[in-house]
Image (cartoon, grey):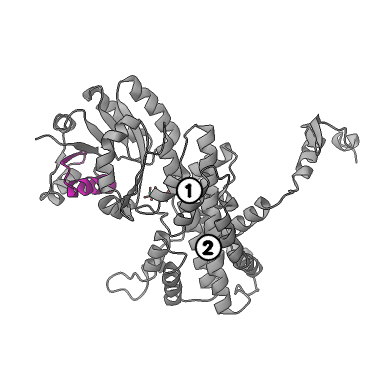
Amino acid sequence: DKYAFGMIGLGVMGRSLLLNMADHGFAVAGHDKDAGKVDSLNQEGSHLKVKGFLDVKEFIQNLKTPRAIMMLVPAGKPVDSVIEELSPLLDKGDILIDGGNSHFTDTNRRVGELEAKGLHFFGMGVSGGEEGARRGPSMMPGGDKDAYAVMQPIFEAIAAKVDGEPCVTYIGPGASGHFVKMVHNGIEYGIMQLLAETYEIMKNGLGMDNDAMQKVFAEWNAGRLQSFLMEITAEIFTYKEKGSDHLLLDDIKDEARAKGTGKWTSQVAMDLQAPSPVIDTAVAMRDLSKYKDMRVKAAEKYKSSQESTLQGDQAELLQSLEQAFYFSMIVTYAQGMFLLTNASIEYKYDLKLDEIAKIWRGGCIIRSLFLNDIYNAYQNDKSLAHLLLDDNVQNLVKEVLPGARKIVSAATAAGIAAPGYAAALSYFDAFRSARMPSNLTQAQRDFFGAHTYELIGKEGVFHTQWVINKMAGGN
Ligand code: 6PG
């Protein structure tokens, strides 16, 4: 009997997803060049209809036609190598899915290349890490709609469920699936940065020990801040290695790594002029963390005699911190959603933001209680210009804004870096400015570069000979 689905790349994600499919009764096959990975799939799946093949031709021959194959290999060159090796072995009408974190421009190119060969190709974001892949991920498929329709029953079966509904939906044409997954990761970076700052404020600003921080994260996770990232943070604050008397967390180097999806989000956000400063800040802080030696030297040079404790009542400050987190998390999601709005127009993705919020409520890394509010906002108004303009969100924001102001100013005064919180608040204050100071920027541009400006209440563009002498080097 032939297999209904094939997976190329039996790393943690590929293997887990395949076993998830087998759990749901699908007969599935896997291929990897690493014999160890093929063996471990065969062992783990010995009681299921799943088989690993070391030989790619044998793998292909054992798939039902038209074939449905997913690649879960590292983004970039490995994806092209697999496609190159695979395409001569495939037949017209076969479906090829890229389930990795590919850059959406690569996906665009591959859509064109593979369509020309008569293959159905689609790019699909898969979120949820190992556990998600094994028990129910959130999936963001985009591209060939007919191919998606063929795959839909399998994907809906294996996806995470919220209120009985699967966390997968057809996202849109072209590379939209990978684009939406990239923005998901950008939001993930932003929220992780906010959590890191929260840790810093509690530890150094409020002098809390690990147990106390654990309690707060767990408490918050039981309330409106409920989210997967909050939940795992609370859990990290309980984890000790066998026989150890202290948290593993305290042994981990303070240098963050990144595979690039957050940076891509910021790069694209700038290309599309969709400001996302919380995400930008998160990328910048991961990068800054790498310069450990430099930071150690600077710490010595700029040692301050000033206390780094936050001024105020501890219980009140914690309440403000909870508000500040809620506020900044809302702003982070809002920036991500606005980027999606702009991309949808620019790339003609026709994204359904309500549906996207809905499939992010389960399975993925940024799942949270607040996604219900995002879902409702875009349900109420499918062409909502910005999440912060939704009435319900407006009420939530107004309620927690004082906490955000208090924390940003207290942290700043104490010399504790809280750039994510500060970026969220400053973005918000600029966003709610009917008048920004950008008239000065325009005047300056015209002054030194004759870049022209526009006038209030008057059509056209204008240029002025400002003070000539200044530009001629005089004073
Ligand atoms: C997910 C994750 C997953 C991965 C990212 C982030 O949605 O399951 O986002 O895709 O963790 O690649 O990785 P970095 O932090 O290494 O960039």
Quadrant of the rendered image containing residue 53: top left
Residue 193 located left or right of residue 242: right
**Marking on residue 379:** 1
**Magenta span contains residue 405:** no
| Region rendered in magenta | 13-34
| Residue 267 percent across, percent down from the top left | 54, 40
**Rendered residue at 27%/71% (across/down):** 242
| Residue 225 percent across, percent down from the top left | 47, 64
Instruction: Assign a secondary structure to mark 1.
Output: helix
Mark 2 vs mark 1: in front: 1
| Residue 181 percent across, percent down from the top left | 42, 44
**Rendered residue at 36%/67% (across/down):** 235
**Magenta span contains residue 22:** yes
Type of amino acid at the residue the image marks with label 1: Gln
**Marking on residue 326:** 2
| Residue 407 percent across, percent down from the top left | 60, 67
